[in-house]
Image: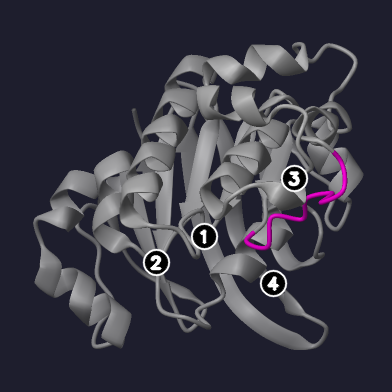
Amino acid sequence: MTIRLECADLTGGRGSTTAFRNVDLAVEAGSVLALLGPNGAGKTTLLLTLSGLLPAQGGTVSVDGARLRSGRPTAANAAGVVLVPDNRCLFTTLSVEENIRVAAKRNSPKPKELLESFPALEKRWTLPAGALSGGEQQMLVMARALIQQPRVLLIDELSMGLAPLIVEGLFATVSRIATDHKCAVVLVEQHVNLALEVADAAAVLNRGNIVLRGPAKELAAAPELLENAYLGIHDTEVDQSSAVATS
């Protein structure tokens, strides 16, 4: 499989503050990496740096082997990097269709083709985004990301404010997107068990460092290791080779 997203020795933060340091990750096409960790660990800042919205303080980010210029979100997006933010950022007065259409690129599919992945949006097609439920809004955010035909999809807190049953359905859709579109997905998530069910590999970020990583199934079977990683008791890896998320 092709390494789609790779960062090497990546360090970043906001202003003069460093939020994470010396991060090495690689995610293959068609796979999902769950990025876990306690609040304040630097996960969102890492996603913003990968997407170019924040400049890196050091290290590199590459897509399909091509190095991205630090702090250039337009260039990152042109390379296929799409961020799904935790605050959704919808145009609440525009319709569902209009919210999807504004994100379309020259070779994007037609907006209604996204209904294959998100059929629940069909009955809401002409409604303003602000009238949708939280789950429907999250589906719309994902549809807006998907119409950009991402090669790398960065998802920040998909489950925020949603019922567990809705979250399970969204996670299943994320898995299908990775597989069907050969997309590399980095999923930041607080619902650890649900994230490990959908992911191929996982990494725990704590106090700005990757303190645990490995195949998702192995980490799910090692709750004590996960607990220690969240508490910052010690640094470890299930498998040194599992920095790569594989499908």
Circle nearer the N terminus (4, 1) = 4
Residue closest to the eye, 204 or 105:
105
The mark lying in front, picked from 3 and 4, is 3
Residues at marks 2 and 3, CA–CA distance in whole angstroms: 25 Å
- Where does residue 46 sit, x and y in percent of width and height? 62, 64
Image quarter hosting the N terminus: top left
**What residue is shown with label 1?**
157
Q: Amino acid at mark 4?
A: Gly
Residue closest to the eye, 88 or 189:
88
Circle nearer the N terminus (1, 3) = 3
Q: Which structural element holds mark 2?
A: loop
Q: Which residues are magenta?
A: 86-94
Residue closest to the eye, 161 or 22:
161
Q: Which structural element holds mark 1?
A: loop
Image position of 247 (left or right of 89): left
Which residue is at a point 31% across and 40% down the rendered structure image?
A: 198
Circle nearer the N terminus (2, 3) = 3
Residues at marks 4 and 1, CA–CA distance in whole angstroms: 20 Å
Image position of 102 (left or right of 65): right
Q: Is residue 21 magenta?
A: no
Image position of 169 (left or right of 143): left
Question: What is the crowding at mark 4: few (fewer than 14 residues within 10 Å), some, or many (at least 20)?
Answer: many
User: Is residue 41 visible in this depiction of the protein?
Assistant: yes
Residues at marks 2 and 4, CA–CA distance in whole angstroms: 21 Å
**What residue is shown with label 3?**
129
Question: What is the crowding at mark 2: few (fewer than 14 residues within 10 Å), some, or many (at least 20)?
Answer: some
The mark lying in front, picked from 4 and 1, is 1
Q: Main secondary structure of the magenta part?
A: loop
